[in-house]
Amino acid sequence: MAGFLLFDTAIGRCGIAWSERGLTAVALPGPSDAQLRTHLLRRTPGAVEHGAAPGRPAGTPLPPFAARARAGIVALLAGADDDLADIPLDDDGLAPFHARVYAAARQIRPGETTTYGALADRLGADRGAARAVGQALGANPWPIVVPCHRITAAGGRTGGFSAPGGVATKLRILDVERAHAGGDPTLF
């Protein structure tokens, strides 16, 4: 059964949605729980909020991968060194190029950053593909799990961030991870 869950983290209320195959969406803190629910349901129509399903006994456990996702996201946003790479994603209907970009982004460890151009190079694309990489990351349905916040623009610029809060949220997450937005990890 497709479901979703809202939960608290060190940077605010987040959410995840899932199918039987894996996560379908991650929502970073937004203005309200209602907007988080709307975002998750847009990505996972028909999902039922965990604990709110008719006939579901109170205390029904989350699917193991959803419980792992929640715990991992909470830990990462509290400063833990967790890359969340073991969390399965439901990539049904995902464009092949986007899938390649997301797989490459998931290899970037907490505290590290790279540029859109360098990520394009890793994919074997020319530097002109940096814009396409940025567009794929702007459509990322799994921020944090697919760490699009770790990809920055050339020349030490932060680049964009499509999650609620925009670049301020990106910088906050990079700060939690003790990463430098200019592409190199900080010394402290």
Image (cartoon, rainbow, N blue to C red):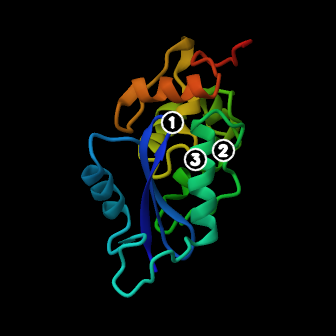
As drawn, the label of residue 10 is 1
Residue that carries the numbered disc 3 in the rendered image:
73
Residue sitting at x 74%, y 12%: 187
Counting other residues with Cα less than 10 Å from the Cα at mark 1, is it few (<14), some (14-19), or many (20 or more)? some
Mark 1: which amino acid?
A: Ala
Callout 2 amino acid: Ala
At a point 43% along the width and 47% down the height, the residue shown is 14
Which label is found at residue 105? Answer: none
Structural distance between the alpha carbons of marks 1 and 2: 26 Å
Q: Earlier in the sequence, mark 2 or mark 3?
A: 3
> Label 2's element?
helix
- 188 lies left or right of 90: right
**Which residue is at the front of the view, 127 or 56?**
56
Where the C terminus falls, by quadrant? top right
Q: State the image coordinates of residue 70 (x, y, percent, origin top left).
A: 56, 55
Say which quarter of the image contains residue 81: top right
Mark earlier in primary sequence (3, 1): 1
Disc number at residue 104?
2
Q: Secondary structure at mark 3?
A: helix
Q: Estimate how packed mark 2 is, as few (under 14), some (14 to 19) or many (20 or more) residues with alpha carbons within 10 Å.
A: some
At label 3, counting other C-alpha atoms closer than 10 Å, the crowd grade (few under 14, some 14-19, many 20 or more) is: many
- Measuring from the top left, give residue 146's x and y in whole percent: 57, 46
Residue 179, image x and y in percent? 64, 22
Instruction: Please tell me which of labels 1 and 2 falls first in the chain.
Output: 1
* Residue 27 visible somewhere in the drawing: no
